[in-house]
Amino acid sequence: MQKITRRLVRETAVSDRGRPLLIELHPGYIIFRLKGTRQRYSIDWEALYRFAQRREAERVFAERYAKRKTRRR
């Protein structure tokens, strides 16, 4: 795997309002923006990782809750 040592810009397959989503990978953070716009949203890698952990925990909780609810009936 290659470390990020400089800015790297990639166009994703995801689009919003007909514009592709661009990501800029930096050594300490990531920037999201729509192609052709100046509005940028940045988040550091640690916060993004924590967000992904929380989303996974919520998904597992909802799955267990749904299973438990159907078992009770």
Image (cartoon, rainbow, N blue to C red):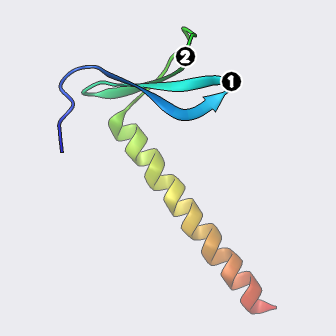
Task: Check disc 2 and report its element: helix, strand or loop.
Answer: loop
Give the total number of marks visible in the rendering.
Answer: 2
Looking at this view, is 41 or 23 the one in front? 23
Q: Residue at x 58, y 63 (%)?
A: 59
Q: Residue at x 38, y 45 (%)?
A: 49
Identify the image quadrant of the C terminus.
Answer: bottom right
Q: Is residue 5 left or right of residue 14?
A: left
Location of residue 46 in the rendering, given as x and y in whole percent from the top left corner: 34, 40
Res 34 → quadrant: top right
Q: Residue at x 29, y 24 (%)?
A: 26
37 shown above or below 46? above
Q: Is residue 41 left or right of residue 19?
A: left
CA separation, marks 2 and 1? 10 Å
Location of residue 33 in the rendering, given as x and y in whole percent from the top left corner: 52, 20
Q: Disc 1 designates what residue?
A: 18
39 shown above or below 30? above
Amino acid type at mark 2? Lys
Task: Check disc 1 and report its element: helix, strand or loop.
Answer: loop
Q: Disc 2 designates what residue?
A: 35
